[in-house]
Image: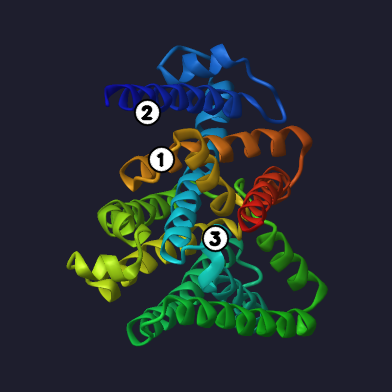
């Protein structure tokens, strides 16, 4: 019995080392390459010129932290959704959270000229984040009410998808009515970005994600029971509605925060849980949740390094790396049904 535990511990250590190395490489990568040893020296308090220190700590460090937080948040959300819906292709945006945030941002961008905020970049930036959060909260409340009323989890899934489609349709109408400048602003937000987050915004983002992750950790026992089916979970004394509400709240908090601040970032929440299951060869969420956090962190740092190297939006890279994993999952499930 000790051998599997030893393997798991070694795997966690190996992933931790890889995460630290990628963090250093990510900070070294940019318009001006800074050697990894210099990055390490600055992070450990070594003496270096003020310009290098400012580039690393004031600009690149914030971006790397944001990338890591996105990877952790979306990966854990995806794991929860796949467990709750018993669907290997479920992802964090399944409940329409992304569409809700998009609708809030679209309404703000269209309404900003009417409010006279176009000449105030700071107000515009805060408004985009705030409107994304409001849109997410509205969708979350709708899904929470539905999940309390609907007993069948499939009904919740269908309603979440329908809410997403309705929000998407309204977004398209708003895009059609918007000017070229407004359309460009919304398109840039929807492509996902890590570079525009400031230190004060990060100060708001981190506590919200920490609360969402604490919810996720508190739901580990419920997730393990749900793996065996809702009927079995009920016989073990689990309150299905309450557990489901907590899981949905955690997912919406994590996904909504990421989407509001950075725009929708696809495929990480869908692909990373499968990679984690493959690495650890385990279905226990006591291992999968921290394992998914580490794997998500590594995946997002890798995507950010590639995105900066080729000057591409990070969403393009997550899609290119995520699609092969999704195709593998589909092929695996098709073989099972033969």
Residue 156 in the image, given as x and y percentages of width and height? 46, 79
Q: Quadrant of the N terminus?
A: top left
Instruction: Say the numbered circle drawn on residue 8.
Output: 2
Label 3 neighbourhood size at 10 Å, few (<14), some (14-19), many (20+)? many
As measured in the structure, the alpha-carbon distance from the residue carrying label 2 to the one carrying label 3 is 25 Å
Q: Which residue is mark 1?
A: 282
Q: Nearer the viewer, residue 126 or 209?
A: 209
The residue under the point 42% across, 76% down is 153
Circle 1 residues within 10 Å: few <14, some 14–19, many ≥20: some
The secondary structure type at the circle numbered 2 is: helix
State the count of labels.
3
- Whichever of labels 3 and 1 marks the residue nearer the N terminus, that label is 3
Please, which residue is most extreme toward the front here? 338
Q: Quadrant of residue 216?
A: bottom left
Q: Which residue is mark 3?
A: 91
Q: Is residue 61 left or right of residue 3?
A: right
Which label lies toward us, 2 or 1? Answer: 1
The disc, 2 or 1, on the residue closer to the chain's N-terminal end is 2
Question: Given contact means CB atoms under 8 Å apart, are the residues at marks 2 and 1 in contact?
Answer: yes
Whether residue 169 is situated above or below residue 310 in the rendered picture: below
Residue 173 visible in the picture: yes
Q: Position of residue 204 (x, y in %)?
A: 39, 55
Left-right relation of 17 to 246: right
Quadrant housing residue 175:
bottom right
Residue at mark 3 to residue at mark 1: CA–CA distance: 20 Å
Asked if residue 177 lies left or right of residue 152, the reply is: right
Within the image, what quadrant is residue 224 found in? bottom left
């Amino acid at each position: 019995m000790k051998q599997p535990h030893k393997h798991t511990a070694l795997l966690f250590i190996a992933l931790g080392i890889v995460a630290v190395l990628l963090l250093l490489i990510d900070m070294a990568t940019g318009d001006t390459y800074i050697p990894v040893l210099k990055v390490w020296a600055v992070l450990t308090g070594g003496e270096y010129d003020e310009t290098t220190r400012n580039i690393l700590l004031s600009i690149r460090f914030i971006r790397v932290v944001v990338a890591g937080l996105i990877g952790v948040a979306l990966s854990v959300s995806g794991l929860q959704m796949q467990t709750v819906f018993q669907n290997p292709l479920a992802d964090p945006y399944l409940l329409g959270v992304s569409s809700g945030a998009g609708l809030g941002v679209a309404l703000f961008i269209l309404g900003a000229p009417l409010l006279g905020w176009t000449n105030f970049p700071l107000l515009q930036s805060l408004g985009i984040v705030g409107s994304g959060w409001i849109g997410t909260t509205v969708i979350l409340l709708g899904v929470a009410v539905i999940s309390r009323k609907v007993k069948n989890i499939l009904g919740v899934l269908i309603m979440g998808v329908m809410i997403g489609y309705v929000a998407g349709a309204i977004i398209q109408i708003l895009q059609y009515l918007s000017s070229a400048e407004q359309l460009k602003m919304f398109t840039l937000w929807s492509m996902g970005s890590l570079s525009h987050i400031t230190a004060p915004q990060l100060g708001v983002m981190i506590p919200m994600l920490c609360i969402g992750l604490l919810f996720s950790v508190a739901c580990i026992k419920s997730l393990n029971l749900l793996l065996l089916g809702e009927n079995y979970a009920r016989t073990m004394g689990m309150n299905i509605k309450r557990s489901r509400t907590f899981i949905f709240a955690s997912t919406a908090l994590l996904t909504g925060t990421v989407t509001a601040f950075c725009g929708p970032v696809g495929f990480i929440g869908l692909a990373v849980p499968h990679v984690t299951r493959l690495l650890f060869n385990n279905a226990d969420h006591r291992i999968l949740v921290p394992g998914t956090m580490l794997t998500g962190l590594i995946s997002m740092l890798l995507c950010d390094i590639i995105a900066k190297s080729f000057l591409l939006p990070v969403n393009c890279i997550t899609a290119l790396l995520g699609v092969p994993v999704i195709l593998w999952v589909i092929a695996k499930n098709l073989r099972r049904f033969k």
